[in-house]
Amino acid sequence: MVSEKMRSKIMTALPLVLLLVSIPLSLILWLGNMAFTAFWQGDNETIAPTRWLFSVITPIFFAAYGLKKKSLSISGAILGLFIGFILTLSSYLFLVCLMTFFVTSSRATKFRSKLKNKFEDGFKEGGQRNWVQVLCNSGMALQLAFLYILDSGCGERPIDFHDDYRGSWLALGIVGVLACCNGDTWASELGTVVGSSSPFLVTTGRRVPRGTNGGVSPAGLLFSLFGGLVIGAAYYLAVWYLVDPVQLARSPVQWPIILWGAFAGLAGSLVDSFLGATVQFSGLDKRTQRIVEVPGPGVKHISGISILDNHSVNLLSSIVMGLVTPILANLLWP
């Protein structure tokens, strides 16, 4: 555990770290990219030094913000730096989605936190995502961003399955992952504390206590839809601001990305709920009256079996939506 005094020292030193590390590191990466490109790829275009610089500075800023707001632990911030670097380097469009997910999900986590503390076992003020949670939410997006860099290079391009199939497929996959995670976060963090009715188990329709894995409600499903829609809308707006207008004019319409974001948010939340209701244990601790994920003495079984934990369920859901979203989008894009 990190004391408040140590946390304060870290926060004080971060601006200095930002100045001393970002510029030299970005220049080293740029020079390395130039050398690699010249040696292995001849005269192909290298990544601009401004992109290297922005890819280093931006993740540091958001990691510092997450630590200050207690949305990230130290380990979560360190891994978030790496994930943010790769997504920013690959495309600023992905950065916009990642920023939207981070900010809105953090806000949702803090919403009515005192009420969540009454029925969630191991609840942490502000969320404080550690490296495992960060990896399970963004790991699939990280892999797709790596493939995007290797296959399509770095840059901002519109969705065009006809002329840029692989780049568009990977971009929709990243949108699907982040929309799924954001939709599920909105559903679990907002849906559980809004409304007065108890949720029902997605597999049987049986009413269950709030906080039960696999429990859904009309409010929660609506929040998951809007959580994904926000990611799609952020990507759509970023396309209009960041993509070359000439290239954009030759491309298909881009508005369906909003709908696919909404789809990934809702469908991803349902996939997460189904897995939570079947392969994740939920029980009621009779002593504390809180939902727990581990069976034991004094725990009344509610649903599921103890195969996966919440992190594994989140990871599997994001993988599913990272694969399903681009496949369906390619088939149905107008």
Image (tube, rainbow, N blue to C red):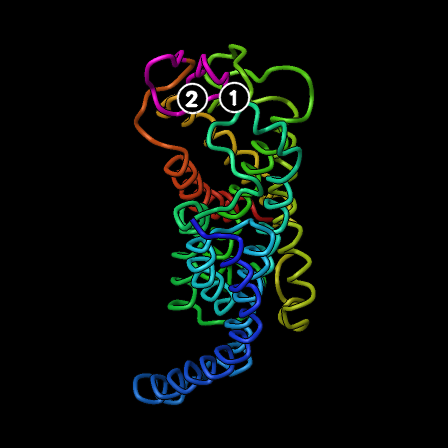
* Circle on res. 166: none
Highlighted range, magenta: 283-301
Residue 79 horizontal side relative to residue 124, left or right: left
Is residue 133 found left or right of 66 in the rendered image? Answer: left
Q: Amino acid at mark 2?
A: Ala
Q: State the residue at coordinates (56%, 20%).
A: 210
- Label 2 vs label 1: CA separation? 7 Å
Please tell me in which quadrant of the rendered image residue 194 appears: top right
For the residue pair 316 and 208, the one nearer the viewer reads as: 208
Which disc number belongs to residue 215?
1
Residue at disc 1, secondary structure = strand
Residue 300 is a magenta residue: yes
Q: Please name the residue that numbered disc 2 is placed on.
A: 277
Place of residue 262 in the rendered image (x, y in percent of width and height, measured from the top left): 61, 40
Residue 150: x %, y % from top left: 38, 68
Kindly identify the residue that appears in the image at 58 percent across and 18 percent down.
199
Please say if 160 is above or below 57: above
Q: State which tag comes first along the sequence, 2 or 1.
A: 1
- Residue 94 in the image: state x and y as whole percent: 54, 60
Amino acid carrying label 1: it is Gly
Establish if 162 lies above or below 117.
Answer: below
What residue is shown at x 39% (from left), y 67% (from top)? Answer: 151
Kindly identify the residue that appears in the image at 48 percent across and 67 percent down: 90
User: Does dot 2 land on a helix, a strand or a loop?
Assistant: helix
The image quadrant that residue 218 belongs to is: top right
In the picture as drawn, the residue positioned furthest to the front comes out as 5
- Look at the image and say whether residue 219 sits in the magenta stretch: no
Q: Tell me whether the residue at label 2 lies in contact with that at label 1, contact meaning CB atoms closer than 8 angstroms.
A: yes
Q: Nearer the viewer, residue 76 or 8?
A: 8
Crowd around label 2: few <14 · some 14–19 · many ≥20 (10 Å):
many
Measured as percent of width and height from the top left, residue 127 is found at 54, 42
| Mark 1 surroundings: few (<14), some (14-19) or many (≥20) residues within 10 A | many
